[in-house]
Amino acid sequence: FSMKKISQKVVRLLKRKKLRISLAESCTGGMLSSSITSINGSSKIFKAGFVTYSNESKIKILKISKSIIKKYGAVSIQVCKSMAKNACKIGNTSMAVSITGIAGPSGGTKRKPVGLVYIGVCKNDMTTVNKYIFKNKGRSYIQKATVKKCLELILNILK
């Protein structure tokens, strides 16, 4: 399945269900937003994309509590959940997806290896976070694998 085909399906399904989506991305740097907005008609469903790469922008733009970041780290279930919830709120949408992870090649630790990614989905005030460990086959591979997984998650939730 190509990324474009999955993106088209996502846009089509969101349109059919009359849902709008907001995205909060960190380690993918806007790649998910880009894959959705590359589809014609995405303006009907895409409301906002926040690329909050630094902790400072997570705090300032997404209103993530400084203490949560300090206690758990930016790459954590807690931060990912807050990112999704707050993207829904700030974007004023019924659905949001958030991404935080370590794309590498550096930055990994034993507890948080390169390839560790959390993906959060907020829909109608219900937020779930999934943890993935993608193979460390380079930064670009991890970013693309993450975006593909996000698109698949959106499809599964909407079906």
Image: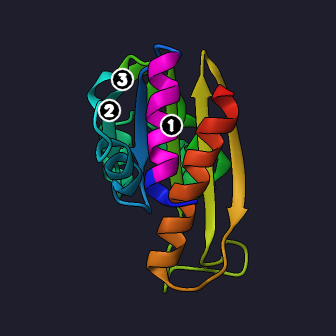
**Could you tell me how far apart the alpha carbons at marks 1 and 3 are, in whole angstroms?**
22 Å
**Image mark for residue 10:** 1
Q: Is residue 30 visible?
A: yes
Q: Is residue 81 above or below residue 107?
A: above
Q: Residues within 10 Å of mark 2 (few under 14, many from 20)?
A: many
Residue 12 in magenta?
yes
* Residue type, numbered disc 3: Ile
**Residue position for label 2:** 42
Q: Is residue 83 visible?
A: no
Between discs 1 and 2, the one toward the N terminus:
1
**Could you tell me how far apart the alpha carbons at marks 1 and 2 are, in whole angstroms?**
9 Å
Between discs 1 and 3, the one toward the N terminus:
1
Residue 127 appears at what percent x and percent y?
Answer: 65, 29
Say what secondary structure mark 2 lies in: helix
The residue drawn where x is 34% and y is 30% is 46
The reply to whether dot 1 and dot 3 touch (C-beta < 8 Å) is no
Residue 121 appears at what percent x and percent y?
Answer: 60, 35
- Quadrant of the drawing holding the N terminus: bottom right
Principal secondary structure, stretch drawn in magenta: helix
The reply to whether dot 1 and dot 2 touch (C-beta < 8 Å) is no
* Residue type, numbered disc 1: Val
Front residue of 55/33: it is 33
Tell me the magenta residue range. Answer: 5-16
